[in-house]
Image (cartoon, rainbow, N blue to C red):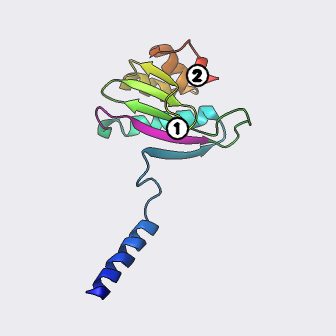
Amino acid sequence: MKATSIGYILALGAFLGCKEPNLFSPYRDVGSFSSRVEAQNQALAEIVKNYGSLPTNKDYKVKYTNANALPSEYRQSALWYNKTDQTLKLELSIPDGAACIWKKVSRDVLEQAIKSNDGMLIVDSLSTPNQPTKTCLR
């Protein structure tokens, strides 16, 4: 019995040691990019790519890193998308929570955004922001 228990403990340790990095994280990490705009474009593309399987009534959180962030800028940020509410939220600094919200962000708006070179400007212009235009996009 003791050998079996030790075997289970070792198997659990091996599983947890080899787990996928995002297995227990509420964020899907799309990686590190050379600019904020490039990182946000990749986060938007990740949302559109998974649109059909996004959860309902729950935020899908996509984390990204701006590798060349200035000392005054945030290095890790995230976009949250809620498919049911059609809201897109920007979390400027993880884990501070969403600082900016855009409403009426449909799949069509997201698709138009990823076709552009600056997707968040498209989102800002085609949806309803809760903050003055371009405030969160500096």
Q: Label 1: which residue?
A: 42
Q: Is residue 18 visible?
A: no
- Please state if 16 lies on the left or on the right of 34 as rendered: left
Q: Secondary structure at mark 2?
A: helix
Name the quadrant containing residue 83.
top left
Tell me which segment is drawn in magenta.
Answer: 55-65
Quarter that holds the N terminus: bottom left
Q: Secondary structure at mark 1?
A: helix
What's under tag 1, amino acid-wise?
A: Gln
**16 inside magenta stretch:** no
Q: As rendered, which of 73 and 106 lies closer to the eye?
A: 73
Quarter that holds the C terminus: top right
Q: How many marks?
A: 2
Q: Earlier in the sequence, mark 2 or mark 1?
A: 1
Q: As rendered, which of 47 and 73 lies closer to the eye?
A: 73
Quick check: 6 above or below 13? Answer: below
The circle on residue 136 is 2
Query: Residue at position x 58%, y 36% from top?
Result: 93
Label 2 crowd bin: few (<14), some (14–19), many (20+), radius 10 Å: some
Residue 105 on image: x %, y % = 40, 21
Query: Residue at position x 52%, y 39% from top?
Result: 95
Residue 129 on image: x %, y % = 48, 15
Query: Residue at position x 30%, y 27% from top?
Result: 84
The circle on residue 134 is none
* Real-space CA distance between mark 2 and mark 1, rounded to the nearest whole angstrom: 17 Å
